[in-house]
């Protein structure tokens, strides 16, 4: 056994924040008080909460299915943009959202007794909630275009580090590291996630949002289901036809949403 889902999320943010500080510390001068609300949203909904929800979901359902669920991010980005920022919804995009939701239902397959997920299907809702958090965060990032990608990443991670430090202090994180001889691999895995999966990827993603649109940037989640399924198969996870069908339907919905 390694770390809990909450510890993984918290430690990942700490590693990401420390690494980002190395190359983005000068960006601290870009801070504006008017950006606080959007930065808090990015810190918690774009980092802290999803980084806990995804590990919790993976503890109960195959990671390949969680990866497919993450492809709903563009749809949530569109929905949040419509509700919070009054972006117009064309009929074709509405159709795309509806198709994406159908794909999610196919993926979950809660009414089948032969489902790999079985009675654990509600945990998919955690992954969906995480994707929704990303949708909200992406819309907030689009309102921070006056900041450099490095600054947005640094400020968001600093904000997310505060609850992360508290979590690690009041859990058995340090004692786990000191007491378990086989903890090195999980520790390095979390560090890798923080440096490459959070710090560097956030800088690139924030840059992409600044030069394109929130929906286009969110579409990078297209590749997540494919990679997740491949790794799931390699790892020996059991995946059924409805999982692949659900992925195809979700991606079709997202593709329709992204059409001009």
Image (cartoon, rainbow, N blue to C red):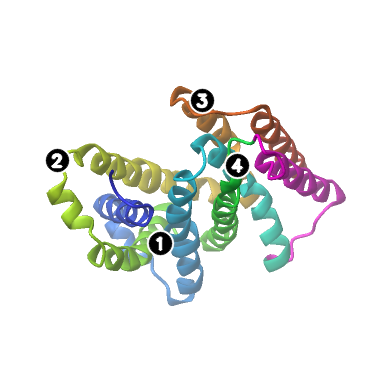
Q: Which residues are magenta?
A: 85-114
Which residue in the rendered view is the most extreme toward the front? 113
Depth check, mark 1 against mark 4: the one in front is 4
Q: Is residue 172 above or below residue 64?
A: below
Q: Which callout, 3 or 2, points to the residue nearer the camera?
A: 2
Mark identifier at residue 156: 1
Q: Which residue is mark 4?
A: 118
Magenta highlight on residue 20: no
Cα distance in 3D space between marks 3 and 2: 30 Å
Discs 3, 2 touching: Cβ within 8 Å: no
For label 2, the SS is loop
Tell which tag, 1 or 3, sits nearer the viewer: 3
Relative side of 155 to 176, left or right: right
Look at the image and tell me whether residue 185 can be seen: yes
First in residue order: circle 2 vs circle 1: 1
Of the two numbered discs 4 and 2 in the rendering, the one whose residue sits closer to the viewer? 4
Where residue 181 is drawn, which disc sits there? 2
């Amino acid at each position: 056994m390694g770390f809990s889902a909450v510890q993984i999320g918290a430690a990942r943010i700490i590693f990401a924040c420390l690494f980002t500080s190395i190359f983005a510390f000068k960006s601290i001068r870009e801070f504006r008080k008017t950006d606080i609300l959007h930065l808090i949203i990015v810190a918690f909904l774009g980092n802290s909460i999803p980084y806990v929800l995804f590990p919790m979901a993976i503890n109960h359902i195959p990671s390949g299915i969680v990866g497919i669920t993450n492809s709903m991010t563009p749809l949530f980005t569109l929905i949040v943009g419509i509700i919070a920022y009054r972006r117009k919804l064309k009929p074709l995009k509405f159709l795309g959202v509806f198709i994406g939701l159908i794909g999610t239902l196919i993926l979950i397959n809660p009414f089948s007794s032969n489902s790999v997920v079985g009675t654990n299907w509600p945990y998919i809702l955690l992954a969906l909630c995480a994707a929704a958090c990303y949708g909200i965060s992406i819309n907030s990032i689009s309102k921070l275009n006056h900041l450099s990608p490095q600054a947005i990443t640094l400020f968001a991670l600093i904000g997310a580090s505060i609850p992360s430090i508290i979590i690690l202090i009041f859990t058995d994180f340090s004692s786990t590291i000191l007491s378990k001889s086989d903890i090195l691999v999980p520790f390095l895995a979390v560090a890798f996630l923080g440096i490459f999966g959070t710090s560097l990827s956030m800088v690139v993603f924030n840059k992409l949002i600044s030069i394109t649109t929130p929906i286009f940037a969110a579409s990078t989640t297209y590749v997540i289901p494919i990679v997740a399924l491949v790794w799931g198969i390699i790892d020996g996870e059991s995946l059924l036809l409805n999982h692949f069908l659900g992925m195809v339907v979700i991606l079709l919905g997202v593709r329709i949403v992204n059409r001009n």
